Image (spheres, helix red, strand yellow):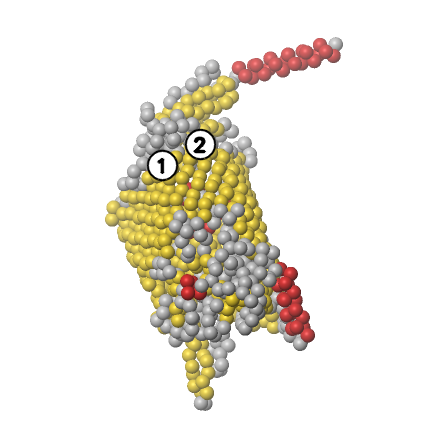
Amino acid sequence: MKTSKTLILLLGLALSSQSLSAQQNDRIHGKIMLSEQAPVKNALLRLVNTSYQAKTNNLGEYYFENVPPGEYTLQVVLNDIELMREPIHIQKDISEIPAIYAPLNNNVIEGITVYAFSRNKFLDKDSISVSKMPLKNLENPQAFTSINQQIMKEQLTYDISEVLKNVPGMVKMQGSPGRGSGDGSFYYSLRGFPTKVSMVDGVPATTNGEIDPADIERLEVIKGPAGTLYGGAVTSFGGLINSVTKKPKDYFGGEASYLMGSYNLNRVTADVYGPITDSRNMLFRLNAAYQYQNGFRDSEFRKSFFVAPTVSYQVNDRLKFNLGAQIYNYEGTNTPIIFLPRTRPYFAHNPDELGFDWKKSYSNNDMTLKAPSINVKAEANYKISDKWSSQTLLSRNFRKTEGLYQYQFIRGNESDTILERNVQWQNSEASSTSIQQNFNGEFNIGKVKNKVLIGLDYLNQSINNNHSPIVVFDKIDGRNPSGPVGGSVTGIYGNISRDLALKRINGAIQDAIDVKKNALVRNTSSANLYGAYISNVTYITDRLITLLSLRLDHYQSEGQLNMNTNIRAGEFKQTALSPKVGIVYQIIKDQLSAYGNYMNGFSYTPPVIQQLADYSGDMKPQMANQWEVGIKGNLLRNKVNFTVGYYDILVDNIQRGIGVFQDGKEYNIVVQDGTQRSKGIEIETIMNPVQGLNIMAGYTYNHSRFEKADADVEGRRPESAGPANVFNSWISYILPISGLQGLGVGFGVNHVGKQITGNKVKTGQFAFPAYTLVNASISLEKERYRLGFKMNNLGNVQYFAGQGVVVAQMPRNFVAEVSFKF
């Protein structure tokens, strides 16, 4: 009886399954085409308001499984851009849907992959975050560069510094990953001033180490002082670098890749995204990366782990929440930085004359720093009406440094050969909290259209230091590191390790305790910044556009508390007013525009202690004012894009020292009447002249000098200005070879002119010679996988970076990649 019941149940299930199957078509298929010969490849297809999705293949074909008969709307998406929507009717027992043709007049097609080629795939110029409002590039009276995912993938980049070589005029100055006290980061020259990656998705996100590119969608470099919209705490007078992260997608997919390369490079990355709910109102994305690499020096390595989860929730058609984090764990040896003399003339005036072995690290692999960091950002977007929207941002950043840091100073008064090795135990924690509220709106005054941005922001920055003193470890001969001890040489190159360094540090601490002195560097500091800004764009005509912006910014420093003495010093308050004016005239509507701007940036200046009571120690903010004119073009239906500009930046309120005589005695007084001028030209072009050929190139010239400053530097080029001449290029070509679709080659040249890294009257000049780097790549990209190989620095050129220091850079190296898409 039990067996009979079981058979009846199984028979019933089988019949019901067949009945259900009869109500659905097992598989339906169709094609998406531009014409009879031109399929739309790799497009994402969705049946709107259902969970059904598919992708087109190289023939434009698609397949849906088990879709019930009925009326549906088919959405076609290419590269996350909606191409079209088409109503379709799925009938019982009919498996083929008639071919659907995308509209040929769709402007979106010009920027996306259709024929397995991308039209101007390096072009990514329309950004909301640059001006914090929806402005097209040709409407924006400001120059900026955007480096997108396409470039990063083609160049097999795993290092932000390599990505930024594609920005006209940008050159790495120096990097001290992990170093505490708030300056452990990578700095780059831009328009004659140092800058760093300091913002993520438009909010402050300072790091004390490197930045992993795994979750970067694009890097935006905003040129010139940008204090009006972004404040003065995390921006530079030359501009700012904003990292735009990858966002969740409403369909499932991802990519996993492995990179290997020179000096034991091993890097594994994963990118997974998709909907959490069937309604696709909750989405996720997860990026992760692990990397290990030795350096080209004898004792050098770095390893890191990075993970970036993000979730978005579309509550309704008006309200959307985003929550994301970037968690980075880093450990590595110190970059071997050699500090030039600062108080006497140089004997050597370039790296060759120093005669050092640049493959020496002067350290040991067990002398490492750990530098974990975390960024968390929450965002709420609310559509108030058809014309007004609200954006609320809350971000939190935390970073820590712990471990040994090492310095190399050139010492002695008879030559530049003696290197004094110094060691320090560093232990610091820093954090920042940012709150930002933006309102974007549109309104008309009569028939004149206006776009307006109204914003408020708050930023708190704090740092706690608990370091050992910097302790002299030994002195070695830089030209003969393993030479004998004697004279000025007190140590042997290889006799350094973590244990020996800690022993020397602990001895110095005990010596200080024995004489009742403070043995440790222990302090804490904090500051609050409050800002309010407004920006209005007026479309006087459909071609003439003006921009007016103003920021009121208030800085409140709590000074620094010496935790050894419990004495706080350096509290101050300052307020800055930062205007911005711009004008654009479209000579050819939506193709060619002339622009001009006046932009302002500022930097708060702490008070000083004066030797005479007649002179106040209170300072004013430094101010940078820029005038810029230029031309932007986007011609031949996105095939030729360019920006040509001339800028002139004047910085005033720079501190300088003067001598004041009183009662027959000279006193050193700090005044704030110094000025620095930086001016130059910038040329950038992104082209797609023929199918499959993409070109990105740029050239910049910068003239920078102190016009009024301390006598030691007046009239000279600042050491932080970087090189005067910089050229960059990258050419990519997809070979039209039958049977080898997706095979591409790339070739790039970066030329950097002479850089003066030491430039004072008392020292003379120390310069890095000009150099040219040649890079080349080959890749094969298919629908489900990608293979790539790249050689960097093909000529094995020896080149250097630094500001008042000397740091040798990477020689010839290779990178190979295999990645799988799903």
The residue located at (51%, 66%) in the rendering is: 477
Q: Position of residue 305 (x, y in %)?
A: 57, 47
Q: CA distance from mark 2 to mark 1?
A: 15 Å
Is residue 381 in view from this perspective? no
* Amino acid type, callout 2: Glu
The residue located at (38%, 31%) in the rendering is: 741
The residue located at (37%, 51%) in the rendering is: 750
* Amino acid type, callout 1: Ile
Kind of element beneath mark 2 = loop
Q: Residues within 10 Å of mark 1 (few under 14, many from 20)?
A: many
The residue located at (38%, 22%) in the rendering is: 99
Location of residue 370 (image quadrant): bottom right
Q: Which residue is mark 2?
A: 783
Q: Position of residue 535 (x, y in %)?
A: 39, 55
Residue 734 bears which disc, if any? Answer: 1
Location of residue 512 (image quadrant): bottom right
Q: Earlier in the sequence, mark 2 or mark 1?
A: 1
